[in-house]
Each structure stands twice: as structure tokens, then as C-alpha cells.
Image: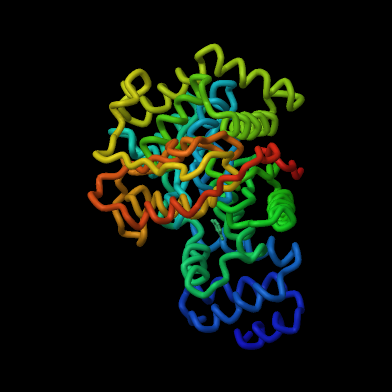
Amino acid sequence: MRMVDLINKKKEGKALSKDEIEFIVSGYVKGSIPDYQMSAFLMTVYFKGMNRAEISNLTLSYVNSGNTVDLSGIKGIKVDKHSSGGVGDKISLIVIPLVAAVGVPVAKMSGRGMGHTGGTIDKLEAIEGFNTNLDYNTFIDNVNKYKMAITGQTANLTPADKKTYALRDVTGSVDSIPLIASSIMSKKIAAGADAIVLDVKVGSGAFMKSLDNAKELAETMVAIGKALNRKTIAIITNMNEPLGHEIGNANEVREAMEVLKGNGAEDETTVALTIAAYMVLLGGAFKDFDSAYEKLKDIIKSGKAIEKFKEFIKIQGGDTEIIDKPDKLPNSKYHVEIKAKESGYIEAIKADNIGVAAMLLGAGRRTKDDKIDFAAGITVVKKYGDRVNEGDAVFILHTNMGNCTEAKNIVETSFKIGKEKPEAIKYIYEIIK
Ligand code: URA
């Protein structure tokens, strides 16, 4: 087989066989296929697409390029969730204790932040002592005993995706549905869960900007999951403004705890409860969505959810005092208000820009070796549809940097105030089964 022939075959819009896809992926990992040929191939996929069988085969080749996690030592149906990436997305912190509280095992492998989107592992590391690098046996034991554990991705999980993603990032082929679907699903399949709930975000802060594209991505991922014998559901959720009020790391942990205590923002609480309800449904704990949703609401109301979060912190070695004293989490030196220049209603927020501004303040990484400042971030004081008066704070920037002009300029131009109250928005658009 020659790589150039396979590039030409895809260029003509023809489907590649399982062996041809395996030849490309394994050749790229080994180094026998150079970056320039792989770049040409990825761009051809970008324009010509792939059918479902090709996408499943690409996913499997990514999975087979490295190790997979064996979760067979855990009793019950292991559930996992994945977000396609958003701003202020702290849903994993909320759903892990919630799902575990009803006895469904969550064995979660999570990533770090990428670009304007945050990562669960970075957020949890804002808690002093929290170990995000559990060894395999502790990970399995914790899930068996407490129904929950989280760890960062092991070095050799889907190395083919890692290498390909880095190339896509610099050659303009990230936003291709077959490539995103295979990239995300390969990591989920390799991580070993039996059931997967996918949170596919759509809107200004997401990779998918239109509902049609989000739907296609969701349907593609659900089809891959099913083809590879995983129970899979996708939930399409709104990312036209940051989720909740906090974007960053320590402040997101504080806000997740508020949701678990029953004082969360409406958008965040609804999305978290919906995802958790589908997780426990797939985990076999309930027969229907409504009873699962109501039970999870009760768990929050009764105080069990925040107790379970305390247990989660404890078993991973973190400081549990933050539950009662959230101010023990890192706090920044400076708090800069961005004020409304006119009165009216918040009509639009460019969530991706707000994510970039949070990164510039130190909450994320510009390059992969940057160190995160856990105290940095942004508070969204006024959300979509809220009334504001001239001079009200709309955002607060939290930073340890004396000069935050660049982030300030971005935030100042990333929201719009209108005269009329805008129409209510949906938090959940569609469920793809
Ligand atoms: N997240 C991933 O893991 N892969 C993609 O391709 C895009 C988002």
C-alpha cells in the first residue's frame, strides 16, 4: 500500500477499507508516514468526509495504537461522561458525586484544558493535596468502595489521536466532524466504561457553532459507541454563554460546591442534573428519566450530594475543609470590574472570547508547558437576559497580574446590551439515543 494512493482515493470521495485506515494510522504513529502526507490526508477528510464504517474503523485504529484501561475489576455498569468542550464547564465535578451517591460506579479519566476551554483535572488540582494521578489499583479500589474515582489520562492512551490532534491543530483540520468524533470516542472507548453520556455543546463557546452540526456530531458519536458495544447517549446543550457564573479553576470548584449544596445557577443545575440522570439511567439504577432526575434533586436537597463530594476529595487526598470554608481555595490579589456602559438587558455574550480572556488572566495555558494560576478567572455577574443598569458590574476579572489590559479589552467587547428583554433560551436542545 502507498499513502499517496490512499490520499488520492479519498480525494475522489471513495471510502477507505479497515486495512487501509489501519495502514495510515499505524504508519503515522511509527513515523513511516510523514507529517506532510498525513496533513494532506486530514485535509482531504475535512473536505470529502467519511462514512460511519470509516469513522468507526478510524476510532478503533486510534484505540489500538496504545493501551486500554481494564475496568473489569469493577462491579456493575461503569458509566462515563464527556463534554465536547465549553467555557465554565464544571459539570464533571458535579455529576461524579451525584451519580456515585445513587450507587452507580463512575471511573473517570479526564483531561486538562485546551485553548479557551477548561479541563476537569486542572480544576481539581486547585484543591490542595488532590491527587489527579492515581495508580491503577487505587483507582479500581476507590470505584469499588466509594463508586467514584478520577485520574488524568495515562501517557499511552490513544497515542495516535494525540499525535494526529497536534497536527490537526496547526493545519486547520480540527473542526471536521469525522475527525472530532473519532478523536473523542477513541479516548472514551480506551478508558473502558460500559456506558457513555456525551455532552455535545453548541454555540459561541463550542467547536460546533450550529445546531445542525452539533446534531451530526452527536449522531456520529452515538453510532460509533453503539457499533463498539457501548451504551451511548448524547445530550446537545447550550454554550452560547459560559455555564453558570464562574470561569477558571478555584472559582469553578467553589461554584460546583454551590450546585451540590442546592444553590446553583439554573443553567448549570439543569445541565448537570440532566447528564447525571442519563448516567444513572444507563447505569441501570432507574427505569425512567423523570424518576432519576427527581431522585438526584432529592440527593442535593438532603445534603447527601455535598457529603459525597467531601468524600470524593478525601479519598483523593484533598483538603476537605474547603467544603465549609470555600475561601480556603486560592484567591487572587486583584478583582477588576467590567461595567455596563448603558442600561438594558444582556442580549449576547461571546463565550469563546470570555474563555480566551480567562486564559490570558492565567486560568488556562497559552502553550502546553504554561503553569496555571488556580486563583485566576472571571465571574459572569450578569447572564443572558439579565437586566443591567449603567455602571453595574457585568463581569469581574480575577488575576494576580498587575496589568490585565489585553483580557480587559477582550471582555469589554464580548457582550451586547439591548433595550428589550431577549427571548428565553433553552439549556438542553436535544437528546440523541
Ligand atoms: N476534543 C477532542 O478530544 N478531540 C477533538 O478533535 C476535538 C475536541
Question: Could you tell me which residue is drawn at 62 percent across and 88 percent down?
Answer: 4
Residue 249 rendering spot, x and y as whole percentages:
38, 40
Q: Position of residue 413 (x, y in %)?
A: 47, 54
Residue 147 vs residue 203, the one in the foreground: 203
> Which quadrant does ligand 1 occupy?
bottom right
Quadrant location, the C terminus: top right
- Image height check: is 357 above or below 65? above
Q: Which percent across, then down, holds residue 131?
A: 34, 37
Residue at image point 61% right, 60% down: 180
Tell me if residue 212 comes above or below residue 24 in the rendering. above
Return the residue nearer the eye: 413 or 71.
Answer: 413
| Residue 190 appears anywhere in the view | no
Q: How is the rendered protein coloured? A: rainbow
Q: Is residue 232 left or right of residue 90?
A: right
Task: Give the camera-side residue of 193 and 213.
Answer: 213
**Quarter of the rendering occupied by the N terminus:** bottom right
Can residue 292 be spotted in the picture? Answer: yes
> Residue at point 37% right, 21% down?
323
Q: Hey, which quadrant is residue 336 in on the image?
A: top left
Q: Is residue 87 above or below residue 393?
A: below
368 lies left or right of 241:
left
Residue 188 versus residue 127: which sits nearer the camera?
127
Q: Residue at x 68, y 19 (%)?
A: 294
Residue 86 horizontal/vertical position (percent): 53, 48
**Residue furthest out toward the top:** 302
